Structure formats: C-alpha cells, structure tokens
Image (cartoon, rainbow, N blue to C red):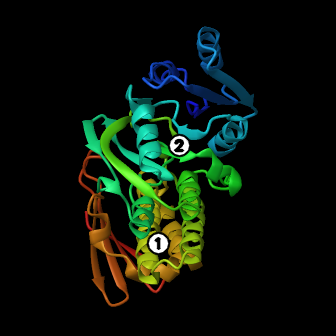
Amino acid sequence: MIPKVSVIVPVFNNEKYISKCIESILSQSYRNIEVVIVNDGSTDKSEKVIKTYREKDERILYLSQINSGPSEARNKGIVNSTGDYLVFIDSDDTVDKYYIEYLLTTMINSKVDLVCCGYKDYSKYGIIDHTDFNMEGNIPFNELLAMICGGTGGVLWSKIFKKEIINKNDLRLNNNIYMSEDLIFTLEYVIHSRSFKSIKKYLYNYNRLNESSISANISIDHLENSISVCENIEKILSRVSYDNKKINNIVTERTLNAVLNTADYLMLNANEKRKVPILRKVLDIPYIKKYKYQFSTRKVLYKPYIFFLKKDLLICFFIYGVLLNKMKYFKYEFIGGDLSEKSLS
C-alpha cells in the first residue's frame, strides 16, 4: 500500500503568495498526498484563490475557521488529516518538486521517526542555502534537541512527521504561544520518538520577503511570549534528564535575544523618555533576572550590539547609524536590575 502524506497549510491574508505555494505542492513528484488548507479567517482574496485550486485538484481539502491564529489552524489540520505522515508548509513559502519524495523515502528506508532537510533562505540579500542540522545521516538524541532549540531548527517545515506518534501522544500546538510554538511541538514530538535523520538537501524555500508575517514584526509585546517559550523548553528538556548546563546555555541565549529584540523595538519606536524606564522594568522581570548576569557578546555576534562584562555590570552599546539615517550611540548599564542611560552622541 502506498502511504499517504498530508500537507498542512495554514493561511491568513496571503493572497500574494498562496498561489505559488499551492502550485509547488500540487506539482510534487510524490503524488499520493492530500493538501489540508486551513483558512484562518482571512479577509483578503485568499479564500477565492484556494477554492479555484480546489476545483482543479480533488487532493485539496479546504477548511476554514474564525481567526484563531496559526496554532489553532495547524491543530485543525492535524485533526482532519488522513495521511500516514505529515508535513507542514507555510502559505508564503514553496517547496522543491522532490520535497515530499525525498523526506518520505528517507523515513521509510531508514526506519526513523523524524527526517529533516535544509532550506533555501530567500531575503532582500539574496538566496542562501542553510541547515540547522549540521550532519548527514542519523542524529543522536541529545544533539538533535540542541539543534531544535537553536536557529530555525525547531520550525515545523523542512521535516516529515509520523501521524501515529502525534496521535498516540495527543500532540498539539500550544494556542497560548504565538511565536516558537512550533519549536515546543517539535521538542515534544522528538522526546516521544526513537530515531532521527537529516539529509543534506535544500528542499524548502523559506520566504523572508513577506514583511507582514508575524516573525517580521517583533515588538515589546513578544517578550512575555519568549519567556513562556523558555519556560516550556526548560520543562521539556528536564523531563528527559538533559544536561543542566546545556539547558542553562540554551535558555540564557534565548532570554538574551528576547531582551535585545525588545531593545531593538524600543530604540526605533518608543518615546525617548520611556526607553530607559521600560528597559528597567524588563530587566527586573524575575525570569530575566535569573539569567541576565550570564549574558555575553559571543552569543549574539550577528546583532548590532557590543557587550562589556565586569562582575555584575553589563554595559551594552546599541549602534543604529543606518537605521536612523544618522550615527547615534546609546550606552546602557545593567546593574542589579537598575539601568541608567548615558548619551554618547
């Protein structure tokens, strides 16, 4: 019997990209698929586009719901899917013609529970081949957990899952988390699995050109969400007796990034008089206070920040010459949760 693969695609106001996404799925070399498209309350022409394709290809299952977010849309797709295997594709992305065939063939032939591949990163800077799974072949359990928690390793796309494992353990995406909810789902899936493999092929096309996506619009409101993600990571990794030092390193880096993303947003959007008071409150959040003295520059070399550490003092320079169209420096001193500003311009 030829196994069926369910492709789950959540859609919200994506009329600009959804056609290319659907076409790349329907043209897959592996034909025994069902395409479960869940319209998450779109108010643009997304529904019209989807229905046009559904009339042409009976493999499309179209579902709709009142806007409830991507987690609920994906959960609806999981519940209504009938395939033996699941892959997830975002509606503004596309996939290589052999995406499903390579992932499924590897999973069946290798008898593993999860297969991962690389992706092509499309942005205004060009196209870059990338993978968070820095090995080809079988991946040790502990190393996979670390890879999932870093970079884009925890996303649902670029992977194939077994529906049996998802159903057996009643795995669903957490509706209370709206960013990195897929990372938590993937971690939960992995700890209920036994074997894993990666293939060195770049089969998924990740579109960073869609500036309206959630991940492209980080604001201070995301801080609470980021803390919730870190708390979930700690709980999950602790359940499998993952090394405490490694858990600490993972959570410290993610907490630091959450703080810096908040600083990014404040620098560009907040009133001058409110920046320091808000950041002072951020640094006094109990969860952040647990990790802030472990922050270090080497964890965020790709960001426009320079850190100097001295005992319990963290001095941070924010450089925004290009973004503000003028050179402007700010220096912040983090001392025991207190924060003072000194203008260097």
Q: Are marks 1 and 2 in contact (CB under 8 Å)?
A: no
Position of the C terminus by quadrant: bottom left
Give the distance between the C-alpha atoms of the residues marked 1 and 2, in whole angstroms.
22 Å
Q: Position of residue 286 (x, y in %)?
A: 58, 79
Task: Work out whether mark 1 precedes mark 2 in sequence or the reverse, and give the earlier one.
Answer: 2
Residue 166, numbered label: none
* Image position of 246 (left or right of 179): left
Count residues near mark 2 (Cα–Cα under 10 Å), then give few for <14, some for 14-19, many for 20+. Answer: few
Above or below, comparing residue 316 to residue 105 in the picture:
below
Q: How many marks?
A: 2
**Which secondary structure, mark 2?**
helix
Q: Amino acid at mark 1?
A: Val
Q: Amino acid at mark 2?
A: Ile
Q: Mark 1 — residue?
A: 251
Q: Residue at x 46, y 38 (%)?
A: 104
* Image position of 284 (left or right of 143): right
Above or below, comparing residue 203 to residue 270 in the picture:
above
Q: Position of residue 267 (x, y in %)?
A: 41, 56
Q: Residue at x 41, y 43 (%)?
A: 106
Q: Position of residue 72 (x, y in %)?
A: 69, 43
Q: Mark 2 — residue?
A: 214
